[in-house]
Amino acid sequence: MEEELELYERRARRAEIAAWIVIAVFAVLLCLVVFVAVVVLFLVVALFGAAAPK
């Protein structure tokens, strides 16, 4: 019984670590997507700003 509990705790800890890794990866991907979107928006604004008749 004691060994089963220890095995379950170890499995739960491993699952928790895996969940945190997945959350961290998604957070990094979200930051990258936001960064790329801001850069693209800036480039579009710069290009259309330069192309606009004055």
Image (cartoon, rainbow, N blue to C red):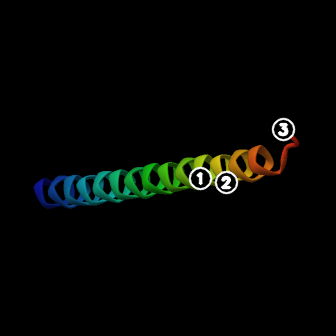
Which part of the image, by quadrant, shows the N terminus?
Answer: bottom left
Which part of the image, by quadrant, shows the C terminus?
Answer: top right
Looking at the image, which is closer to me, 7 or 24? 24
Looking at the image, which is closer to me, 27 or 41? 41
The three-letter amino acid code for the residue at tag 2 is Leu
Looking at the image, which is closer to me, 48 or 32? 48
Comparing labels 3 and 1, the label whose residue is closer to the camera: 3
Q: Residue 36 appears at what percent x and percent y?
A: 59, 56
* Quadrant of the image occupied by residue 14: bottom left
Q: Residue furthest left?
A: 2
Looking at the image, which is closer to me, 15 or 20? 20
Q: Residue 3 appears at what percent x and percent y?
A: 13, 61
How dense is the environment of label 3, judged by Cα within 10 Å: few (below 14), some, or many (20 and up)? Answer: few
User: Which label's residue is closer to the chain start, 3 or 2?
Assistant: 2
Q: Residue at x 88, y 42 (%)?
A: 53
Q: Residue 43 appears at what percent x and percent y?
A: 67, 54
Instruction: Answer left or right for 42 relative to 13.
Output: right
Q: Which residue is mark 2?
A: 43
Comparing labels 3 and 2, the label whose residue is closer to the camera: 3
The three-letter amino acid code for the residue at tag 3 is Lys
Give how far apart the Cα atoms at labels 2 and 1 are. 6 Å
Q: Residue furthest front?
A: 54
Give how far apart the Cα atoms at labels 3 and 1 are. 24 Å
User: Which label's residue is closer to the chain start, 3 or 1?
Assistant: 1
Q: Which residue is mark 1?
A: 39
* Tag 2 near tag 1, CB within 8 Å: yes
Q: Residue at x 75, y 53 (%)?
A: 47
Q: Which mark is residue 25?
A: none
Instruction: Answer left or right for 25 relative to 47.
Output: left
Q: Which residue is mark 3?
A: 54
Q: Residue at x 35, y 58 (%)?
A: 21
The three-letter amino acid code for the residue at tag 1 is Val
